[in-house]
């Protein structure tokens, strides 16, 4: 019998690792606060219990817009934090242990990213339930579905950010720095409060702006509270440019980790 014949079949996904990872994050106070409790709390402050929450938007009300914004923020935080942890594990030598099992590094990464998406879906669900209970409204049911889908699919952009940070920075601080950066991006990216003038001009070049604007699109059609309108091409260009930057950052981290190996 040849060596090829007895070689174990390589797996592309590890259900046990997926389950363990999700349960581990559910027991992590930092993750629960910043990816579940914080987005819900900020939605209630800026939308759910705000006196302007019932103000009409193009296809719903302001509560819905704030709800989508906080769901996107929670997803970006979860993806960046959890993917930076996964990258840090590989950098610390966990990848060599994985190479001894039927699960390749690609399968390990796919499992970790899927776990991050699953956890992100909990954040989105929590914010959307809070929105339902406090009167967030959209003209059609499909607008809820499309906004949630854009949030989760677009959140993978910040998984690349987390991977790059995890590969390049100290493992002890990578996850915290990745999450803190997302919060900073949110404040300067027109996510938490409406910006205008020069601040809005700056916001249009930040990572969260295009992502959150696209998630809001089903309710806003690109219209801003300040009366301006973003064209779809500008929103998509922001996403494409930052995706390229974050991908380059992640690849740089991979190259650096291989040089150290």
Image (cartoon, grey):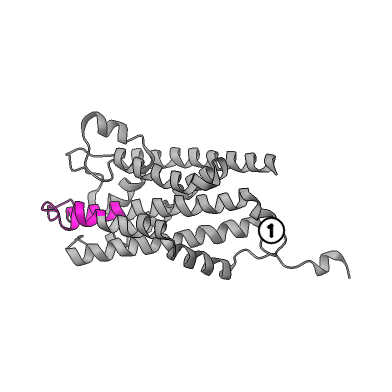
Answer whether residue 198 is magenta in the image.
no
Q: Residue at x 55, y 47 (%)?
A: 171
Residue drawn at x 66%, y 63% as measured from the top left? 103
**Where's residue 233, x and y in %?**
35, 40
Q: Quadrant of residue 153?
A: bottom left
Q: Residue at 56% across / 49% down in the picture?
A: 88
In magenta, the rendered stretch is: 42-70
Q: Position of residue 138 (x, y in %)?
A: 21, 60
Query: Would you say 239 lies left or right of 87 here?
Result: left
Residue 108 % position (x, y) = 60, 59
The residue where tag 1 is placed is 97
Relative to 56, is 25 above or below?
below
Residue at image location 59% in from the left, 38% down from the top:
252
Whether residue 59 is visible: no
Residue 97 at least partly seen: yes
Q: Can you say whether 36 is above or below 6 in the image?
A: above
Please name whichever residue, 31 or 142, is drawn nearer the observer in this view of the structure: 31
Question: Is residue 66 found inside the magenta-colored segment of the image?
Answer: yes
């Amino acid at each position: 019998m040849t060596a090829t014949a007895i070689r174990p079949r390589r797996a592309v996904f590890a259900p046990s690792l997926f389950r363990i990872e999700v349960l581990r994050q559910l027991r992590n106070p930092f993750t629960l606060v910043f990816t579940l409790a914080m987005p819900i709390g900020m939605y209630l402050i800026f939308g759910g219990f705000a006196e302007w929450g019932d103000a009409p938007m193009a296809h719903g009300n302001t509560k819905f817009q704030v709800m989508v914004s906080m769901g996107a923020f929670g997803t970006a935080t979860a993806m960046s934090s959890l993917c930076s942890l996964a990258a840090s594990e590989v950098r610390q030598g966990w990848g060599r242990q994985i190479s001894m099992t039927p699960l390749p590094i690609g399968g390990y990464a796919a499992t970790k990213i899927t776990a991050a998406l699953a956890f992100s879906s909990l954040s989105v669900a929590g914010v959307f339930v809070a929105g339902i209970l406090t009167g967030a409204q959209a003209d059609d049911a499909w607008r809820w579905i499309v906004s949630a889908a854009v949030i989760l699919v677009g959140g993978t952009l910040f998984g690349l950010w987390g991977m790059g940070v995890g590969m390049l920075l100290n493992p002890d601080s990578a996850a915290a720095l990745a999450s803190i950066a997302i919060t900073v991006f949110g404040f300067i990216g027109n996510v938490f409060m409406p910006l205008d003038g020069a601040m809005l001009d700056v916001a249009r070049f930040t990572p969260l702006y295009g992502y959150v604007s696209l998630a809001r699109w089903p309710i806003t059609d690109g219209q801003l509270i300040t009366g301006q309108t973003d064209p779809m091409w500008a929103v998509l260009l922001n996403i494409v440019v930052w995706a390229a930057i974050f991908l380059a950052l992640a690849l740089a981290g991979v190259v650096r980790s291989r040089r150290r190996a």
